[in-house]
Image (spheres, rainbow, N blue to C red):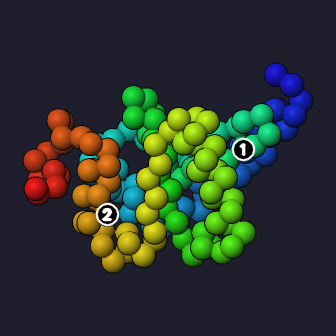
Amino acid sequence: MDQKYKNQQQLNNKYLKELRQKQTRAEKIMQDILDEIGIRYIFQKGFIGKKFHCIVDFYIPSPRKMCIEVDGGYHFTEEQIKKDKFREYYLTEIRKFKMFRVKNEELFKHRAKSKNTLIKFLKIENGIPKNLIPKK
């Protein structure tokens, strides 16, 4: 492992620790939704590329290989929009992950709708209690 990678890994781990200790209300709602659905996930998962590293709010491992981002207010600044576009490109085009984004406000005001949208996005029905399957 080269030194540059080790440095990125150390920086990534530092940010991960900070983010895990400062979970937002919206992230907690999403965590509760994922627990209710029964999906295995990793909260605040870091990924390191050759010249890039990023942290996603939730990562659902294989076979789904999916990232969930809970977008708070700062995600709508011009600078953060650019960063998010590049990060999303890296995750979806290079790492081949699926990406699901939801705004804080959607989780606060429309929790059930957000949950149903996520279930549809996951395309899962087997193994989920029938009351969690969106009505057609």
**On the image, numbered disc 1 is attached to which residue?**
53
Residue 10 visible in the current orientation: no
- Residue in the image at 18% along x and 41% along y: 125
Residue 114 numbered tag: 2
Looking at the rendering, which quadrant does residue 31 occupy? bottom left
Badge 1 marks a residue whose secondary structure is strand
Question: Farthest residue in the top direction?
Answer: 1
Between 13 and 135, the one nearer to me in the picture: 135
The local crowd at label 1, few if under 14, some if 14 to 19, many if 20 or more residues have their Cα within 10 Å, is some
- Residue in the image at 67% along x and 66% along y: 80
Q: Position of residue 74 (x, y in %)?
A: 63, 73
Please state, as top left, top right, bottom left or bottom right, where the C terminus lies in the image.
Answer: bottom left
Q: Where is residue 95 in the image (x, y as percent from the top left)?
A: 58, 35
Check disc 2 and give the amino acid type: Ser
Q: Is residue 12 left or right of residue 104?
A: right
Q: Position of residue 121 (x, y in %)?
A: 32, 49
The local crowd at label 2, few if under 14, some if 14 to 19, many if 20 or more residues have their Cα within 10 Å, is some
The answer to whether residue 4 is above or below residue 77 is above
